[in-house]
Image (cartoon, rainbow, N blue to C red):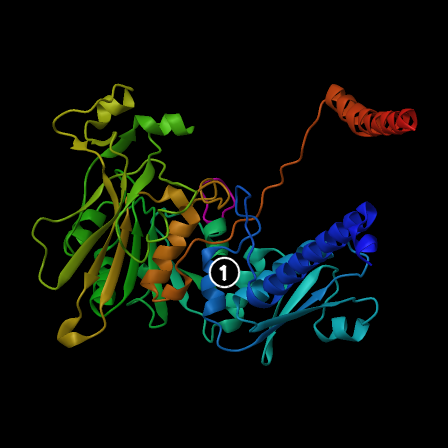
Amino acid sequence: MAGMFGGRSTKYGMNLGLMVLIVLAILVVLELFSKQRFHAQIDTTKNRRYSLAPQTVKVLEGLKEPVKIYAFYQESDPSRTSAEDLLNLYKTKSGKKIDWEFVDPDRFPMKAQQYKVNTYNSLVLERAERFEKVYLAEEEKITNALVKLTRESKPVVYVLQGHGEHSLESVQKDGYSEAKKAMENEYYEVKSLFLAREPKVPEDAAVVLLAGAQKALLEQEWQALKAYVEQGGRLMVLVDPQAAPGVGDFLSQYGLVLEDDIIVDRNSRLLGGDYLVPPIVEYESHPITRDFRQSPYLVYLPMARSVRAAENLPEGINVEILARTGPGSWGEKDLERLRRGEAELNPEDIQGPVAVAAVATVHGKEGGKKGRILVVGDSDFISNGAIDPNRSGNQDFFLNGLNWLAEQEDLISIRAKSAPSRPVMLKPGQWTLIFLVVVVLFPLSILCVGVVVVWRRRRKK
């Protein structure tokens, strides 16, 4: 017996068997921990492609009722894998309040008909008696549908018109059609408001937006806005340099001062922009801006003016600065010299960092609802040419401000961005090199190593 276990081949066999058992034990333990105790993964992609955006996580954490998602994909569709990965992330982050399943519309046409699905790769999100449909499993679309599905009412945003403001319907570079779409995706109803024809701001207004007015408002319009704010209304004012006479006087009643300047930032050119398109680089602590320090996207303001708090605030008014440009910027007050391209920092100018956005809280009479005003020294930053969420943080900054005004603070966050397509473009020579390495050299090297090993073994015998 001792001789049998003491043999050389037996020892090798026992060692090999022991190693196999150890490896199997390690794999079993890893499998148990990965599936039952820990569901962790590391996303190393530049745009966090395989992680959910902060806003999505916040929406999922706020779910109070279960949501069912039907993914209408054919069984042979190769995009099912990416859809499955994304929907599993939603299920995990929601604490399993979200459940989902694939439905092949060809095998189950009654199910597709029930939800009026006539396009492959559609998703239906269902909560109680309500459902929302989206086309393609993309995080931005799914999260927007969840927001719509979980809101009981639709707040109304009135956009003031009639003074040369940006058009909500225009698809031109300076239009606001994309801003309107972004608001609707956050489940707002967007309406135009011609205040000159109305005695007051409508009762159902969640927020009034005054953006890019070029002409002065009538006195009765200012009075209507004043009454609205002081009765607890919410007003967003986006104002360009040298525009909208009367806006400065209106805002000064609430401790907000508009300077007659244009912000210059020569460092903006280092980031690929113009020196009259300053980026925001400093954010104060506020619900609107709290996530921007971690955001990989900058907020750019094309042609902005500075905004500051008055030294002596009126009674019942509280003002907070939200954001500033970089330390190398300044507010240029000599606009004639700026037009000649001779701008330089002088003692009369405003030394950077320059404040460009602020909020005022207006305490209501006898403890009533507090009015809120948000002011940004530029209106172009949410125009169609600047609001693209894949190029800047402008859309997030605007929507966060809107949600703060409307008290939809659970929606204040950094939103999901669609992952840009980055195809690998290879030159003909590179294709040939890859073919030679993968198809010829690699198999040939393995074959040569095998021949050498066989030849050496035969020589030893």
- Closest to the observer, 448 or 8: 8
Q: Position of residue 35 (x, y in %)?
A: 62, 64
Q: Quadrant of the C terminus?
A: top right
Magenta stretch? 170-176
Q: Is residue 389 above or below residue 84?
A: above
Foreground pick, 122 / 24: 24
Inspect the magenta stretch and tell me whether residue 164 lies in it.
no
On the image, the x and y values in percent for residue 120 come to: 75, 60
Which image quadrant is residue 122 in?
A: bottom right
Question: What residue would you read off at disc 1?
Answer: 56
Decide if residue 3 is on the left or right side of residue 123.
Answer: right
**In terms of secondary structure, what is the magenta stretch mainly?**
loop
x%, y% of residue 224?
24, 64
- For image coordinates 33% across by 61% down, the residue present is 404
- Badge 1, how many Cα within 10 Å: few under 14, some, many 20+? many
The answer to whether residue 226 is seen in the rendering is yes
Q: Is residue 175 magenta?
A: yes
> In the figure, 66 relative to 391: above or below?
below
